[in-house]
Image (cartoon, rainbow, N blue to C red):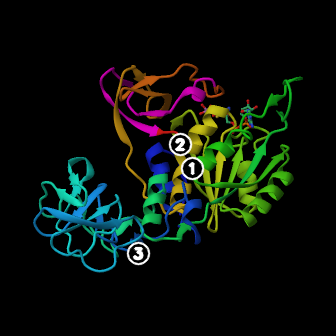
Amino acid sequence: MSALIEGSWDDARGIAQSTFKQLKSESLPVAQCVNRTLAVDAKSLVDLPTYATSAMDGYAVSGPGPWKIVGEVKAGLPMKGVLESGAAVGIATGAVIPEGTFGIIRWESAQVDGTELNGAVVKDQDIRPPAHECKAGDVIVNKGTVLNPAMIGLLAAAGFDEIDVVTAPRVALVLLGDEIQLKGIPRDGLVRDALGPQLPGWLNAMGAQIISTQYISDQLDLVITALKDACEKADIVITTGGTAQGPRDYLHSALEAVGANILVDTVKVRPGHPMLLARKGDVAILGLPGNPQSAIVALASLGQPVIGSQLGQTHKKLAKVITASELSAPQDFTRLIIGNLIDGQFHVAPYLGSAMLRGLAHSDGFAIVTKALTGVGEQVRWLDLPA
Ligand SMILES: Nc1nc2c(c(=O)[nH]1)N[C@H]1C(S)=C(S)[C@@H](COP(=O)(O)OP(=O)(O)OC[C@H]3O[C@@H](n4cnc5c(N)ncnc54)[C@H](O)[C@@H]3O)O[C@H]1N2
Ligand code: MOO
């Protein structure tokens, strides 16, 4: 496949979404699977509810009243035998309904005199029927879903001890640049590394795991060695800086030297213009521009779809929102504009410059702007930053 060179943002994103295969899966205890992506359709192992149970604390009654109270049924301790006509038993919420029960009278509506019970009841009153929520074999969570805590609870209720989730893509980070300073106040023209510390947070939120972080000087042989090593152990290699064509930008030459195929080389988007996506076998190589805001734009634009594909997630169409701010984009370019959704409307953030993080730091995502001018009240697409 030939590379998409300075193509549209949507085409580049389409390539990022469609090129990479789902990784293998692993079986883990359900409680450890929150935020993991389900590798199979989860089919309930039981009917839910599994038994007919009482929805309320009260009395299970059989036949017409008045009834004689003959005992008590607790949750987890089903009554043995049949509830005879004219008999009642005290019953707790969640306890199994005795065979022969007509309905439940809540304790607050029951008239009790010694062992005699009176009250109004209709058939099956306050009884939760079995399989009301699902039958054994029903799909309760679809393959490709990112599991939230409620789903974890549902899977446990449905009888699962372990479940198959997709392995988290392994990311090797390779940060390029002689000017990068890792600690302290920047001095002598050096720049504090603003990407090494933030990329793990974004990548973890997208479902990936960092397996290594390397800082590499602007020397072609070092960049080649770092890329080779990273490609041997990772599912995604993410580089920062060196994507442009400047005198010390070695990413293109290094990709050629390691035998990677470039899929996307520069995109008609601002910020993030020199973003790059390549592959070496099944390994994705994502080149994030060095300017910090541009790097995060590239990660959200191309990195998130690659990770989504490797996790077997379905790529959703972007939602549309109304903009409360007037927005512009350069001719023939897509612009990703940082901002927030307030009452469902997009409000642009300050500090839009591609080298700045101050606006991005307080933004929830990006408006995707393709027209030269989008007026207040018009629709734009919205790309969420992962939370
Ligand atoms: N003649 C041209 N020059 C540039 C163009 C162009 O089209 N023609 N494109 C500009 C755009 S747009 C961007 S974005 C940058 C991309 O540059 P690189 O990916 O090659 O990145 P570097 O040159 O290495 O660095 C750019 C900038 O970012 C700072 N940086 C890099 N890494 C980090 C880090 N880890 N933490 C904080 N800051 C970082 C670096 O110091 C530079 O200031 O190229 C433009 N140039
Ligand atoms: O496109 Mo560059 O990424 O604006 O700074």
- Tell me if label 1 and label 3 are in contact, CB under 8 Å: no
**What numbered label is drawn on residue 45?**
3
In front of the other: 69 or 281: 69
Residue 47 lies in what quarter of the image? bottom left
Q: CA distance from mark 2 to mark 3?
A: 32 Å
**What numbered label is drawn on residue 206?**
1
Q: CA distance from mark 1 to mark 3?
A: 30 Å
**What numbered label is drawn on residue 362?**
none
| Res. 15 in view | yes
Relative image position of residue 205 (x, y in whole percent) = 58, 47
Q: Secondary structure at mark 1?
A: helix
Relative image position of residue 43 (x, y in whole percent) = 39, 72
From the viewer's perspective, is residue 302 above or below residue 67?
A: above
Residue type highlighted by circle 3: Leu
The residue at 58%/20% (across/down) is 351
Residue extending furthest bottom? 81
- Tell me if label 1 and label 2 are in contact, CB under 8 Å: yes
**Horizontal placement of 177 versus 13: left or right?**
right
Ligand 1 quadrant assignment: top right
**What numbered label is drawn on residue 386?**
2
Q: Is residue 252 magenta?
A: no
In front of the other: 297 or 109: 109
Query: What stretch of residues is rendered in magenta?
Result: 358-383
Residue 69 lies in what quarter of the image? bottom left
